Image (tube, rainbow, N blue to C red):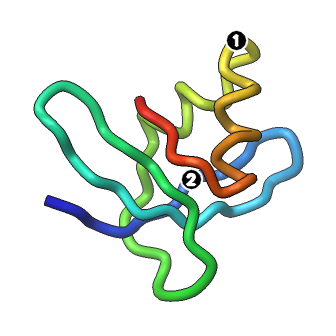
């Protein structure tokens, strides 16, 4: 199953549109450029905005797939 949504980068307030694919134990997030906003993924946003996961957020912004 896949859906579209967005998260907010708390450092600069940037809205990041994402494609979300659900697997059995985690979600795979990939950045997208266009389209509707979709759902607000608050849990993933909170997770990626923690200081320990700063690199994962940067990887997402650079077009890589991130696992949450």
Q: Residue at x 36, y 69 (%)?
A: 4
Element marked by disc 2: strand
Q: Where is residue 30 in the image (x, y as percent from the top left)?
A: 50, 56
Q: Residue 52 carries which label?
A: 1
The residue under label 2 is 7
* Quadrant showing the N terminus: bottom left
Furthest residue in direction bottom, as rendered: 35
Across the whole image, how many numbered discs are drawn on residues?
Answer: 2
Compared across the picture, whether 4 is left or right of 36 comes to left
Q: Residues within 10 Å of mark 1 (few under 14, many from 20)?
A: few
- Label 2 – label 1 distance at C-alpha: 17 Å
Q: How crowded is mark 2: few (under 14 residues within 10 Å), some or many (20 or more)?
A: many
Compared across the picture, whether 23 is left or right of 3 comes to left
Q: Position of residue 9 (x, y in %)?
A: 73, 46
Mark found first going from the N terminus, 2 or 1: 2
Furthest residue in direction right, as rendered: 12
Q: Is residue 61 above or below residue 56?
A: below
Asked if marks 2 and 1 touch (Cβ < 8 Å), the reply is no
Q: Which of marks 2 and 1 is in front?
A: 1
Q: Position of residue 7 (x, y in %)?
A: 56, 53
Q: Residue 15 carries which label?
A: none
Q: Which residue is drawn at 55% across and 30% down?
A: 46
Element marked by disc 1: helix
Q: Residue at x 17, y 39 (%)?
A: 23
Compared across the picture, whether 43 is left or right of 32 comes to left
Q: Position of residue 56 (x, y in %)?
A: 65, 31
Q: Which residue is drawn at 45% across and 42% down?
A: 42
Q: In this view, does 26 lie above or below 39?
A: above
- Which picture quadrant has residue 54? top right
* Quadrant showing the C terminus: top left
């Amino acid at each position: 199953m896949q859906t579209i949504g967005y998260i907010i980068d708390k450092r600069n307030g940037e809205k990041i549109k994402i494609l979300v694919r659900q697997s059995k134990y985690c979600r795979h997030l990939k950045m997208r450029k266009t389209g509707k906003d979709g759902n607000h993924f608050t849990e993933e946003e909170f997770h990626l905005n923690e200081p320990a996961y700063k690199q994962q957020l940067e990887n997402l912004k650079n077009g890589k797939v991130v696992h949450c």
